[in-house]
Amino acid sequence: MEKDNLVLEEYERLKPLYRILERVVNQQLTEATAKAGVGVMQIAHRLKERDSVSEKMRRKANKYTSITDMTDIIGFRIICYFSDQVNEAAKIIEELFNVDRENSIDKRKMLSPNTFGYLSLHYTCRLFPDASYDEELCNLPFEIQIRSVLQHTWAEIEHDLGYKSEFGVPYHIRREFSRIAGLLEIADEAFINIRNNIVNYVDDVRERIHHDKADELLVDINTLREFTKHSAVWQELMDRIISLSGAERIEASPEDFLKQLKQLGITTLGDLKSVVLREREHVLLLVGDALEYFEMDEISSNTVLYYLCQACLVWGDYTEEQAEAFYKASEKNEARRRSRVKKIRKLKDKYLNQ
Amino acid sequence: MTFAEDNVIMTINKKLDGTILEIAIEGRLETTTAPELEAVIKESLDGVTELIVNMEKLQYISSAGLRVLLIAQKTMMKQGRMVIRNANDDIQEVFEVTGFADILNIE
């Protein structure tokens, strides 16, 4: 008991230092995972409360002679979207911190091949000795757990239902937990598969656009994004607009224009390419007009899509009713719709009815 | 108030009715004139619950002008509301092209 009190006194003395450590580690983890582009859903952290420290010492009597023997006073949990990102995050941690191998556990490898359950990677770490940190700070251990979001779901529900109860759990409930763990492991793999398929699809789209063999591809968010980034005809138009306006090119997601392109009957990348080739001089005219009342210092593909749709409505075979229907499909605000239709009428008067 | 520099001219007219302030901008709102509008708005918003920006005679706007509108909008969100009125079709188009149509309250 006396020994426990000494450990608790040490905990209180070191608490401010633990708080500093929590802040330092959080900043380093957040920056490093973001820089490496690991898909991290959340980095959670906590400082163990005095009551939990006390309770742990009671449960594991005679294990702790110093507070630093308890390696999870500061605990971090990194939750990744995909299970293969757990290894990516682990690699970052191994480079970033001084990992105590003896006290680190890969619980994913602890289960035998025919059992399913808790899958997570636990690291015990310290800061690398650094001139900018106190030696005492660098000697404090902290724990980092890394899981996928599905592994996390399983562990949280297991914890919430008190599955680890010391009173034991009936066989059929344990079996149900194992079945769900197996199911989530398959789901984790399936999500990785879906993600990889999307990446492969986008790579294929990009490749086909590069080689001008993408005409039959349907316009969707991926194909439109890749077209506006990599199509030669689009780049040429963008370059001419940039040279005309002196604007800087910025990136923006073109998804808002999917509905409008569909409304104009542009359903494939081939349709879009033909419209660009047909309307590009008109787009330049409209941008030239806009420069009279608007200083464009930044330009995105969305700006070009805006004027491309406008050019279609002015020079294409569209009646005013069709222009109204076009804006009705994409614009809920009636005043704005009216203003856009009026603008089309004005442009038609200017360019077609001279 | 008129702010002139070389050929750049902008006129700002203020009308306060109780806690409703109307600011009418005339001419060109751009890099050289936007700071003046920002200053006028900043010094006039105390106690204002509704800011009406009348753009009936606004002919030109730059991103510096859009930024001032955004700052005013952010301030007014804490103390009331801001509305843009009478923007002509060209200026309206600028708001749409830049995405400001979704941020500003345009009547």
Image (tube, helix red, strand yellow):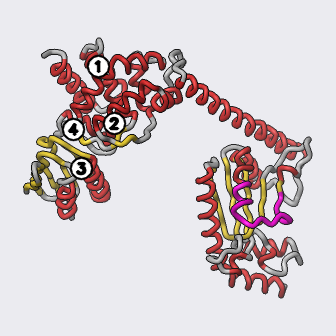
The residues tagged by marks 4 and 1 sit, at their Cα atoms, a distance apart of 19 Å
Q: Which residue is most to the top? A: A317
Identify the subunit bearing mark 1: A
Q: Do pointers 1 and 2 mark residues of a single chain?
A: yes
A104 relative position to B85: left or right: right
CA distance for labels 1 and 2: 23 Å
Q: From what the image shows, is residue B49 above or below residue A293?
A: below
Which badge, 1 or 2, is on the more N-terminal residue?
Answer: 2
> Which residue occupies the extreme left position in the image?
B1
Query: What segment carries the magenta color?
Result: A90-105
Label drawn at residue B65: 3
Vertical side of A232 occupied by A162: above or below? below
Q: Chain of mark 4?
A: B
Residue A189: image x %, image y %?
75, 37
State the separation of the CA atoms marked 4 and 2: 21 Å
Q: Chain of mark 3?
A: B
| Amino acid, disc 3 | Gly
Q: Which mark is residue A313?
A: 1
Q: Amino acid at mark 2?
A: Ile
Determine whether label 2 and label 3 are within 8 Å by CB: no
Are there few (<14), some (14-19), or many (20+) residues within 10 Å of tag 1? many
Q: What secondary structure is the stretch in magenta mostly built from?
A: helix
Tag 2 secondary structure: helix
* Relative horizontal placement of residue A285, taking residue A31 as reference (left or right): left
Secondary structure of residue under mark 3: helix
For the residues labelled 3 and 1, say whether their Cβ atoms are less than 8 Å apart.
Answer: no
User: At label 1, which amino acid type do we have?
Assistant: Leu
How far across and how far down the image is residue A50, in percent? 71, 76
Using the rendered image of the protein, determine whether residue B65 is visible from the camera's viewpoint: yes
The residue indicated by pointer 2 is A242
* The C terminus of chain A - image quarter: top left
Instruction: Kindly identify which residue carries mark 4.
Output: B91
